[in-house]
């Protein structure tokens, strides 16, 4: 769940509904990212000659052996939309400390990194800043098209996540809270989209 008092307006519109939906699922994350409640829908920066795009991302964690069906659905989605991908990592003591969790957990937790990828702009031959103007314009045109597909993808994944909740948890999705009703931690970083 999101921390109490979290400003939903700090979430980017393209990914906001998915963040809320994922936070409704019992046992899935307390914060939306490894560092706090931040995400990124994905961006195109036509005026930045070194970083023309930034992938979209959403981080969450859950007990490793619970809600496997959710991860199965996300993996299936990523197979259908190959510019989306998800990887998981086993959480360790340092991860628990960063999230403000008790390090004496009896069950294993996994951390998930869900990404929406733009076409790569870095390669071994040339940096993006060394591309011709025509190549850069063509890349930005393709990136803007991809951005629309990414936004559509976040929306479709939200629908599939709601379907998972409907079939496995409750038919009354709105009855599931997505925000804590009490403060659990003083740690609440600003809601920012970082260029990664």
Image: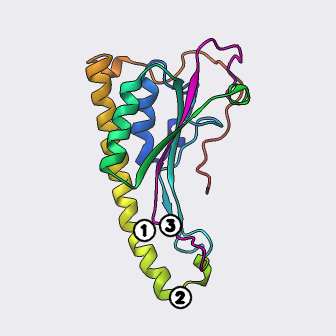
Q: Secondary structure at mark 2?
A: loop
Circle 2 Cα neighbour tier, 10 Å, few/some/many (<14 / 14–19 / ≥20): few
Q: Which residues are magenta?
A: 99-125
Q: 96 and 171: which one is in front?
A: 96
Q: Which residue is mark 2?
A: 132
Closer mark to the observer between disc 3 and disc 2: 3
When the figure is inspected, residue 78 is found, relative to residue 133, above or below; the finding is above
* Residue drawn where x is 58% and y is 50% of the image: 193
Q: Are marks 3 and 2 in contact (CB under 8 Å)?
A: no
Q: Which residue is mark 1?
A: 143
* Residue drawn where x is 43% and y is 44% of the image: 15
Q: Secondary structure at mark 1?
A: helix
* Residue drawn where x is 41% and y is 48% of the image: 14
Q: x%, y% of residue 44? A: 49, 65
When asked about the image quadrant of residue 147, the answer is bottom left
Q: 54 and 80: which one is in front?
A: 80
Direction from residue 127 to residue 67 in the image, left or right: left
Q: Which residue is mark 3?
A: 120
Circle 3 Cα neighbour tier, 10 Å, few/some/many (<14 / 14–19 / ≥20): few
Q: 124 and 122: which one is in front?
A: 124
């Amino acid at each position: 769940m999101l921390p109490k008092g979290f400003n939903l307006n700090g979430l980017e519109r393209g990914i906001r509904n998915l963040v809320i939906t994922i936070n409704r699922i019992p046992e899935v994350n307390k914060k939306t990212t490894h560092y706090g409640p931040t995400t990124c829908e994905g961006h195109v920066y036509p005026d930045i000659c070194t970083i023309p795009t930034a992938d979209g991302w959403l981080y969450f964690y859950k007990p490793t052996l619970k809600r496997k069906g959710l991860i199965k659905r996300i993996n299936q989605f990523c197979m259908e939309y190959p510019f989306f991908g998800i990887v998981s990592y086993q959480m360790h003591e340092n991860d628990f400390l960063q999230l403000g969790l008790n390090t004496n957990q009896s069950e294993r937790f996994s951390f998930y990194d869900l990404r929406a990828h733009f076409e790569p702009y870095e390669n071994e031959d040339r940096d993006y800043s060394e591309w011709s103007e025509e190549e850069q314009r063509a890349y930005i045109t393709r990136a803007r098209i991809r951005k629309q597909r990414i936004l559509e993808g976040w929306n479709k994944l939200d629908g599939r996540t709601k379907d998972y909740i409907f079939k496995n948890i409750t038919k009354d999705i709105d009855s599931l809270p997505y925000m804590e009703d009490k403060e659990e931690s003083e740690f609440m970083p600003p809601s920012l989209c970082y260029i990664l």
